Image (tube, helix red, strand yellow):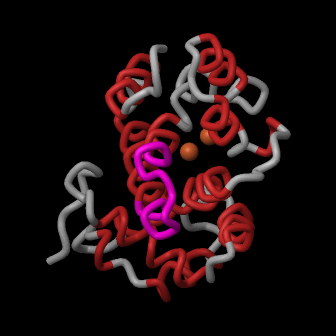
Amino acid sequence: MDGRPTRDDAWKLLREFTTSPSLIKHALAVEAAMRAYARRFGEDEAAWGIVGLIHDFDYERNPTPETHLHAAQRILTERGWPEEWIRAVCSHADSMGIPRDTPMARTLFAVDELTGFLTACALVRPDRAIANVKVKSVKKKLKDKAFARGVNRDDIRRGAEALGVELDEHIAFVRDAMAAIAAELELPPSA
Ligand SMILES: [Fe+2]
Ligand SMILES: [Fe+2]
Protein backbone atom coordinates (compact mmCIF):
# COMPACT_ATOMS: atom_id res chain seq x y z
CA MET A 1 0.00 0.00 0.00
CA ASP A 2 1.59 3.30 -1.13
CA GLY A 3 0.44 6.09 1.12
CA ARG A 4 -2.78 6.15 3.05
CA PRO A 5 -5.57 3.94 1.73
CA THR A 6 -8.49 5.80 0.18
CA ARG A 7 -12.21 5.16 0.37
CA ASP A 8 -11.87 3.52 -3.02
CA ASP A 9 -9.22 1.12 -1.66
CA ALA A 10 -11.55 0.32 1.24
CA TRP A 11 -14.48 -0.34 -1.08
CA LYS A 12 -12.35 -2.65 -3.28
CA LEU A 13 -11.15 -4.55 -0.20
CA LEU A 14 -14.72 -4.98 1.04
CA ARG A 15 -15.90 -6.24 -2.35
CA GLU A 16 -12.93 -8.57 -2.72
CA PHE A 17 -14.05 -10.53 0.33
CA THR A 18 -17.80 -9.82 0.57
CA THR A 19 -20.67 -10.67 -1.75
CA SER A 20 -23.64 -10.64 0.65
CA PRO A 21 -25.87 -7.59 -0.02
CA SER A 22 -26.85 -7.39 3.65
CA LEU A 23 -23.20 -7.30 4.76
CA ILE A 24 -22.45 -4.59 2.19
CA LYS A 25 -25.39 -2.54 3.49
CA HIS A 26 -24.18 -3.11 7.06
CA ALA A 27 -20.75 -1.79 6.03
CA LEU A 28 -22.32 1.30 4.43
CA ALA A 29 -24.49 1.98 7.48
CA VAL A 30 -21.52 1.75 9.84
CA GLU A 31 -19.47 3.95 7.49
CA ALA A 32 -22.20 6.62 7.55
CA ALA A 33 -22.46 6.53 11.35
CA MET A 34 -18.65 6.71 11.72
CA ARG A 35 -18.42 9.71 9.38
CA ALA A 36 -21.22 11.51 11.24
CA TYR A 37 -19.53 10.99 14.61
CA ALA A 38 -16.14 12.04 13.20
CA ARG A 39 -17.73 15.32 12.07
CA ARG A 40 -19.32 15.78 15.48
CA PHE A 41 -16.09 15.11 17.38
CA GLY A 42 -13.90 17.09 14.96
CA GLU A 43 -12.00 13.93 13.98
CA ASP A 44 -10.72 12.58 10.65
CA GLU A 45 -13.93 11.90 8.75
CA ALA A 46 -12.29 10.04 5.85
CA ALA A 47 -10.33 7.71 8.15
CA TRP A 48 -13.32 6.99 10.39
CA GLY A 49 -15.54 6.28 7.38
CA ILE A 50 -13.00 3.84 5.93
CA VAL A 51 -12.66 1.99 9.25
CA GLY A 52 -16.45 1.68 9.37
CA LEU A 53 -16.64 0.44 5.78
CA ILE A 54 -14.05 -2.32 6.22
CA HIS A 55 -14.71 -3.34 9.84
CA ASP A 56 -16.40 -6.65 8.88
CA PHE A 57 -14.71 -7.24 5.51
CA ASP A 58 -13.50 -10.72 6.50
CA TYR A 59 -16.76 -11.79 8.16
CA GLU A 60 -18.36 -13.57 5.22
CA ARG A 61 -15.40 -15.97 4.92
CA ASN A 62 -14.61 -16.01 8.67
CA PRO A 63 -17.90 -15.82 10.57
CA THR A 64 -16.84 -17.42 13.87
CA PRO A 65 -15.31 -15.65 16.91
CA GLU A 66 -12.22 -17.85 16.43
CA THR A 67 -11.63 -16.55 12.90
CA HIS A 68 -13.45 -13.19 12.43
CA LEU A 69 -10.88 -10.36 12.56
CA HIS A 70 -7.95 -12.73 12.95
CA ALA A 71 -8.01 -12.97 9.16
CA ALA A 72 -8.62 -9.22 8.82
CA GLN A 73 -5.71 -8.39 11.09
CA ARG A 74 -3.34 -10.55 9.04
CA ILE A 75 -4.56 -9.30 5.65
CA LEU A 76 -4.52 -5.60 6.62
CA THR A 77 -1.05 -5.92 8.15
CA GLU A 78 0.31 -7.77 5.10
CA ARG A 79 -1.11 -5.07 2.85
CA GLY A 80 0.41 -2.25 4.90
CA TRP A 81 -2.76 -0.62 6.20
CA PRO A 82 -2.28 1.96 8.99
CA GLU A 83 -1.73 0.37 12.39
CA GLU A 84 -4.25 2.61 14.17
CA TRP A 85 -6.99 1.62 11.73
CA ILE A 86 -6.18 -2.08 12.06
CA ARG A 87 -6.38 -1.84 15.85
CA ALA A 88 -9.69 0.02 15.71
CA VAL A 89 -11.18 -2.51 13.26
CA CYS A 90 -9.96 -5.50 15.26
CA SER A 91 -11.03 -4.09 18.63
CA HIS A 92 -14.74 -4.19 17.73
CA ALA A 93 -15.06 -7.82 18.83
CA ASP A 94 -14.29 -8.62 22.46
CA SER A 95 -12.91 -11.99 21.30
CA MET A 96 -9.82 -10.20 19.91
CA GLY A 97 -8.93 -8.82 23.34
CA ILE A 98 -7.77 -5.48 21.92
CA PRO A 99 -8.68 -2.51 24.15
CA ARG A 100 -10.94 0.13 22.63
CA ASP A 101 -8.58 2.89 23.66
CA THR A 102 -9.21 5.51 20.95
CA PRO A 103 -12.34 7.53 20.12
CA MET A 104 -12.34 5.80 16.71
CA ALA A 105 -12.42 2.34 18.29
CA ARG A 106 -15.05 3.28 20.88
CA THR A 107 -17.29 4.80 18.22
CA LEU A 108 -17.02 1.76 15.95
CA PHE A 109 -18.12 -0.50 18.78
CA ALA A 110 -20.94 1.87 19.75
CA VAL A 111 -22.48 2.06 16.27
CA ASP A 112 -21.90 -1.51 15.02
CA GLU A 113 -24.80 -3.41 16.61
CA LEU A 114 -27.06 -0.35 16.72
CA THR A 115 -27.10 0.05 12.92
CA GLY A 116 -28.44 -3.48 12.56
CA PHE A 117 -31.04 -2.91 15.22
CA LEU A 118 -32.20 0.34 13.60
CA THR A 119 -32.51 -1.41 10.23
CA ALA A 120 -34.70 -4.06 11.88
CA CYS A 121 -36.81 -1.27 13.46
CA ALA A 122 -37.27 0.40 10.05
CA LEU A 123 -38.22 -2.83 8.31
CA VAL A 124 -41.18 -3.51 10.61
CA ARG A 125 -42.66 -0.06 9.95
CA PRO A 126 -45.39 0.08 7.28
CA ASP A 127 -43.39 2.79 5.45
CA ARG A 128 -40.00 1.06 6.11
CA ALA A 129 -38.51 4.57 6.46
CA ILE A 130 -35.48 4.73 8.73
CA ALA A 131 -35.95 8.51 9.15
CA ASN A 132 -39.33 7.88 10.78
CA VAL A 133 -38.08 5.40 13.39
CA LYS A 134 -38.79 6.92 16.81
CA VAL A 135 -36.30 6.71 19.69
CA LYS A 136 -39.11 5.66 22.02
CA SER A 137 -40.06 2.72 19.84
CA VAL A 138 -36.40 1.67 19.50
CA LYS A 139 -36.06 1.60 23.30
CA LYS A 140 -39.24 -0.41 23.62
CA LYS A 141 -37.96 -2.92 21.08
CA LEU A 142 -34.61 -3.14 22.90
CA LYS A 143 -36.56 -4.54 25.84
CA ASP A 144 -38.44 -7.01 23.64
CA LYS A 145 -36.13 -10.01 23.63
CA ALA A 146 -37.95 -11.71 20.75
CA PHE A 147 -37.39 -8.75 18.41
CA ALA A 148 -34.17 -8.88 16.31
CA ARG A 149 -32.85 -11.43 18.76
CA GLY A 150 -29.45 -11.63 17.05
CA VAL A 151 -28.61 -8.10 18.15
CA ASN A 152 -26.69 -7.87 21.42
CA ARG A 153 -28.51 -5.29 23.59
CA ASP A 154 -25.70 -5.18 26.07
CA ASP A 155 -23.21 -4.15 23.37
CA ILE A 156 -25.50 -1.25 22.41
CA ARG A 157 -25.75 -0.01 26.00
CA ARG A 158 -22.05 -0.57 26.80
CA GLY A 159 -21.10 1.11 23.52
CA ALA A 160 -23.06 4.31 24.18
CA GLU A 161 -21.77 4.42 27.73
CA ALA A 162 -18.11 4.07 26.71
CA LEU A 163 -18.68 6.75 24.09
CA GLY A 164 -20.16 9.08 26.70
CA VAL A 165 -23.31 9.76 24.69
CA GLU A 166 -26.78 9.32 26.22
CA LEU A 167 -28.52 6.29 24.73
CA ASP A 168 -31.50 8.32 23.42
CA GLU A 169 -29.23 10.79 21.71
CA HIS A 170 -27.01 8.03 20.33
CA ILE A 171 -30.01 6.24 18.81
CA ALA A 172 -31.29 9.44 17.18
CA PHE A 173 -27.81 10.38 15.94
CA VAL A 174 -27.11 7.02 14.28
CA ARG A 175 -30.65 6.90 12.86
CA ASP A 176 -30.14 10.31 11.21
CA ALA A 177 -26.76 9.27 9.80
CA MET A 178 -28.38 6.19 8.26
CA ALA A 179 -31.40 8.16 7.00
CA ALA A 180 -29.02 10.40 5.04
CA ILE A 181 -27.98 7.36 2.95
CA ALA A 182 -31.36 5.57 2.97
CA ALA A 183 -31.24 4.91 -0.79
CA GLU A 184 -27.87 3.11 -0.50
CA LEU A 185 -29.32 1.03 2.34
CA GLU A 186 -32.28 0.21 0.06
CA LEU A 187 -34.68 1.79 2.52
CA PRO A 188 -37.26 4.34 1.37
CA PRO A 189 -36.73 8.04 2.10
CA SER A 190 -38.94 9.61 4.78
CA ALA A 191 -42.48 10.23 3.57
FE1 LIG B 1 -17.77 -7.89 13.32
FE1 LIG C 1 -20.38 -5.13 12.13
Q: Residue at point 25% right, 74% down?
A: 126
Which is more toward the observer, 191 or 169? 169
Q: Give above or below for 85 relative to 104.
A: above
Query: Left of 172 or right of it: where is 122?
Result: left
Q: Quadrant of residue 86?
A: top right
Q: Give above or below for 140 relative to 45.
A: below
Q: Residue at point 49% right, 34% down?
A: 54
Q: Residue at point 66% right, 50% down?
A: 105
Query: Left of 81 or right of it: where is 188?
Result: left
Identify the image quadrant of the C terminus. bottom left
x and y percentages locating residue 19 in the rendered image? 38, 24
| Magenta run includes residue 45 | yes
x and y percentages locating residue 125 in the rendered image? 32, 73
**Residue range highlighted in magenta:** 36-49
x and y percentages locating residue 147 in the rendered image? 56, 67
Query: Left of 61 or right of it: where is 130?
Result: left
Which is more toward the observer, 179 or 31? 31
| Magenta run includes residue 93 | no
Ligand 2: image quarter: top right
Numbered-mark total: 0
Identify the main secondary structure in magenta. Answer: helix
The single residue placed furthest to the front in the displayed view is: 3
x and y percentages locating residue 119 in the rendered image? 41, 61
Q: Give above or below for 117 relative to 169.
A: above
Q: Give above or below for 61 relative to 95.
A: above
Q: Quadrant of residue 181?
A: bottom left
The single residue placed furthest to the left in the displayed view is: 191
The single residue placed furthest to the right in the displayed view is: 97
Q: Residue at point 59% right, 28% down?
A: 82
